[in-house]
Image (cartoon, rainbow, N blue to C red):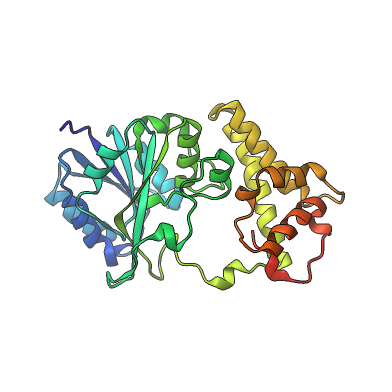
Amino acid sequence: MDYPSVSIAMATYNGEKFLEKQLESLLAQTYKSYDIVICDDKSTDKTVSIIRHYSKKFPTKIKFYSNETNLGYVRNFERAVSLCEGTYVALCDQDDLWDIDKLTTLVCSIGNADMIHTDARLIDQNDKEICDSFTKSAKKRVHANGFLELCVNNSVTGCTAFFRRTLLDKALPFPEMFMHDHWLAIVAKDQGGLKYLDKPLVSYRQHGNNSIGALVSCKDNIENARKREEIYFDRMNRFSYLESYAKQRLSEENVRKIRALKAYYESFFQKKIRFSSAFFYLCNFKTLNSSNNPLRCIYGFFRSLYGRKLKCPITAIGSI
């Protein structure tokens, strides 16, 4: 087998509790040609000393960089991937556990795609399995084909993402207001090369200190009118920003789709009936309404038509 080089990009911050286990799982990979690029974001615990211990023990395998200032979660990952030199790049969190054949499987499975992502199992802080499929438990719409679908509902779990380094030519720098894994997936989708492998290759740890967690309370899915407005306002701003940011990076067709998506959310705040917004909702029904509740689906249509003027007595209907 040919072994193209792979760089594992890990961003760390105060991760002493689970870091050693994760590093051991990375160093146990069966793949023959890979290195680990670690960027630490000014940790105040024992994270740096743990990394230095392993980097001295495995000097040809681990490349360690310490940020002069705290960059934040996304910018730290941006620096990590920019320092990767492998043909492929794998995103890695500090607190998960990788299957030993993860890299081998991904290199063999990516084919002609620009990015591949997989399922994950969920574990707790004691390594006990919570569920065997994050895709199923979170009802991720990984098989949806539309570009708009991916923009609205990110189906890529960052710790499972694996992509060609050439993807970074258009993806860097990461845009504000979007998570790095979401933006990388959007760029890969635009290039026509996003692929899903229905197999868990990582144990995605859930605990109180997650930067991004997987478990969401059922109450969080029942949004009142004020919360709904906040979500719409946030999406309007994000897609407005993305419209201008993506002009030099994505195809004209997909920039137009982002513009239409921004206009849809923008219409919610306008004080007039918008038939174009209602038409957009109907044309993109599966993307904009994931509910199987008929009342919510009908309410979604009238909400797109009347926007914030519509007063709904049943706040639980307003699920997005």
Measuring 65% from the left and 48% from the top, which residue is drawn there?
Answer: 285
The percent position of residue 256, horizontal first and vertical second, equals 65, 32
Q: Nearer the viewer, residue 32 or 303?
A: 303
Is 301 placed above or below 225 here?
above
The percent position of residue 236, horizontal first and vertical second, equals 68, 47
**Residue 8 location, quadrant:** top left
Measuring 41% from the left and 32% from the top, which residue is drawn there?
Answer: 167
Q: Nearer the viewer, residue 64 or 34?
A: 34
The percent position of residue 41, horizontal first and vertical second, equals 37, 53
Measuring 64% from the left and 64% from the top, which residue is drawn there?
Answer: 293
Asked whether, in this view, residue 284 is left or right of residue 119, the answer is right
Is 227 placed above or below 106 here?
below
The residue furthest left is 57
The percent position of residue 288, horizontal first and vertical second, equals 64, 50
Asked whether, in this view, residue 128 is left or right of residue 274, the answer is left
Viewer can see residue 43: no
**Residue 277 location, quadrant:** top right
| Image quadrant in which the N terminus is located | top left
Viewer can see residue 81: yes
Measuring 48% from the left and 55% from the top, which residue is drawn there?
Answer: 140
